[in-house]
Amino acid sequence: MTTTGRRALLTAGVSAAAATALAGCTSEAPGPRKPSAAEREAERVARAEAHLRLRSVTASRTLLERYDAALAAHPALAPRLAPLRRSVAAHTKALGEGGTTVRPATASPTASPTAVASAPAPVPVAADPGTALRDLAAAERTASDAHTAALLTAPPEYARLLASVAAAGAAHAYLLTEGARA
């Protein structure tokens, strides 16, 4: 084969490759890629975990609001309630980490008037301190039960956290009622 023949063959090959590439560029692009079954399952699991975290944080946040209301109504109970309240605040934060944004339980003093107007209604507290403590113990048991129920669908690491928080809630309920008699 002569040099001219080789050049002609090379030119023809390059031309054919360019035509193929150009045809590929001008053809219609395929539609959006459909997620695989594994991707859909991963998304479903992530949504379920986010929903579980939101429920858990909401239960703890509601309990925290109960503590705040009891402390506001009965300041003399502060030495007894303040350590338990701090524990509940730490639980609320821990339950929300890694998937849920936790908003403050109460409006801050620097919040705008609009934010304060949309704040939740105050939690009713019994006038009698003993009744207020029993009500708070019942709220602790309710939150503890909610965390225990969530264990069934929680991923392993979050289930361990939920179990710890549920156990702490049961201990708080005891301290609020039976523990006072000891």
Image: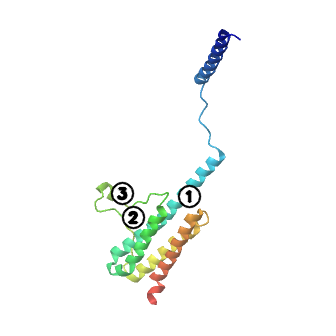
Give the residue type at disc 2: Ala
Residue at the image point whose x is 45% and y is 66% from the top? 92
Q: Say what secondary structure mark 3 lies in.
A: loop
**Relative horizontal placement of residue 57, taking residue 8 as reference (left or right):** left
Marks 2 and 3: which is nearer the front?
A: 2
Q: Residue 45 placed where, x, y %?
A: 59, 54
Q: Say what secondary structure mark 2 lies in.
A: loop
**Relative horizontal placement of residue 52, taking residue 16 as reference (left or right):** left
Marks 3 and 1: which is nearer the front?
A: 1
Residue at the image point whose x is 32% and y is 62% from the top? 108
Image quadrant in which you'd find residue 149: bottom right
Instruction: Give the camera-side residue of 53 and 21.
Output: 21
Q: CA distance from mark 2 to mark 1?
A: 22 Å
Residue at the image point whose x is 44% and y is 57% from the top? 101
Q: Which residue is mark 2?
A: 105
Q: Residue 3 placed where, x, y %?
A: 65, 11
Proximity of marks 2 and 3: CB atoms separated by less than 8 Å: no
Q: Earlier in the sequence, mark 2 or mark 1?
A: 1
Q: Which residue is mark 3?
A: 118
Q: Which residue is mark 1?
A: 49
Instruction: Give the camera-side residue of 135 and 62.
Output: 62
